């Protein structure tokens, strides 16, 4: 079964610091990769997605992620975080055992940005 | 366009009871997926419905079931509730075209507490 690992469970940063959240997945077949964000009290929202092509993908709110196939990684980055980025971030893949229509999520990383 | 709506938003039940949760997808979306979110297990895929048929299922016991109506609205049912069923249940809808993957849009969730 495919799995997704997010190594950082809780990250605390000061405003303007750079962010990198790690994500590794285990499935070797065709997958699509996603980062979702869950702001306090809000719905899960899609930050960005990788389907094919340029491995560096840009999403909303200044976030970007790089797909490195050889490392099975899809790390999320932001050059300068803001207090409003405080949220929980989930890496996800589709494909594999649950098929192309279902998402397998990582355990999430709680980001706390201090003003 | 209205987003995914879920009712009720909060629910308290006791062990042994059964519960039904409802999800109304975004207008025009034909696929509805359900996920369970818990602090211990994270976000896990339950099942997906399309055209009133379950076409994908996660690794959950048979106490968890669902259905979809002709208007794409979906319900999920949990019978013989256990304490471990306490969770946030998320519904997601998508267009369900023939593409490898269609973006899923998540609802606010129903928080179920089992006492």
Image: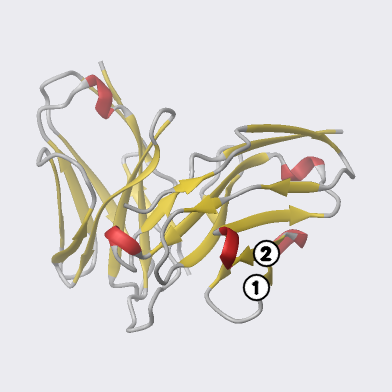
Residue assigned mark 1:
A55
Q: Quadrant of residue A70?
A: bottom right
- Residue B107 shown left or right of residue A33 in the figure: left
Q: Outermost residue toward the top?
A: B115
- Residue A57 shown left or right of residue A26 in the figure: right
Label 2: element kind: strand
- Across and down, in percent, residue A92 comes to 48, 55
- Residue B51 shown left or right of residue A40 in the figure: left
Callout 1 touching callout 2 (CB < 8 Å): yes
- Residue B51 shows up from this direction: yes
- Residue A48 shows up from this direction: no
Image mark 1: chain: A
User: Image point 31% across, 52% down: which residue?
Assistant: A1
Question: Which of pointers 1 and 2 lies earlier in the amino acid sequence?
Answer: 1
Label 2, residues with CA under 10 Å away: few <14, some 14-19, many ≥20: some
- Across and down, in percent, residue B27 comes to 36, 71
Foreground pick, A31 / A115: A31
User: Image point 68% across, 55% down: which residue?
Assistant: A76
Real-space Cα separation, disc 1 to disc 2, in angstroms: 6 Å
Residue assigned mark 2:
A66
User: Image point 76% across, 44% down: which residue?
Assistant: A84
Q: Quadrant of residue B33?
A: bottom left
């Amino acid at each position: 079964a495919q799995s997704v690992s997010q190594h950082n469970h809780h990250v605390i940063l000061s405003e303007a610091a750079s962010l990198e959240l790690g994500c590794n997945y285990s499935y070797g077949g065709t997958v699509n990769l996603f980062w979702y964000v869950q702001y306090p009290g809000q719905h899960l929202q899609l930050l960005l997605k990788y389907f094919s092509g340029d491995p560096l993908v840009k999403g909303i709110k200044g976030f970007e992620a790089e797909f490195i196939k050889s490392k099975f990684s899809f790390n999320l980055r932001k050059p300068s975080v803001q207090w409003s980025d405080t949220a929980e971030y989930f890496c996800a893949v589709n494909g594999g055992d649950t098929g192309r229509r279902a998402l397998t999520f990582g355990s999430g990383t709680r980001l706390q940005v201090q003003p | 366009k209205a987003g995914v709506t879920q009712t009720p938003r909060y629910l308290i039940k006791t062990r042994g009871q059964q519960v039904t949760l409802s999800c109304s997808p975004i207008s025009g979306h034909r696929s509805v997926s359900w996920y369970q979110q818990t602090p211990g297990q994270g976000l896990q895929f339950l099942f997906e419905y399309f055209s009133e048929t379950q076409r994908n299922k996660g690794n959950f016991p048979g106490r968890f079931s669902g259905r979809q109506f002709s208007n794409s609205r979906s319900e999920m049912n949990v019978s013989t509730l256990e304490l471990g069923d306490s969770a946030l249940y998320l519904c997601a809808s998508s267009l369900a075209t023939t593409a490898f993957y269609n973006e899923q849009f998540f609802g606010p969730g129903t928080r179920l507490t089992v006492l």
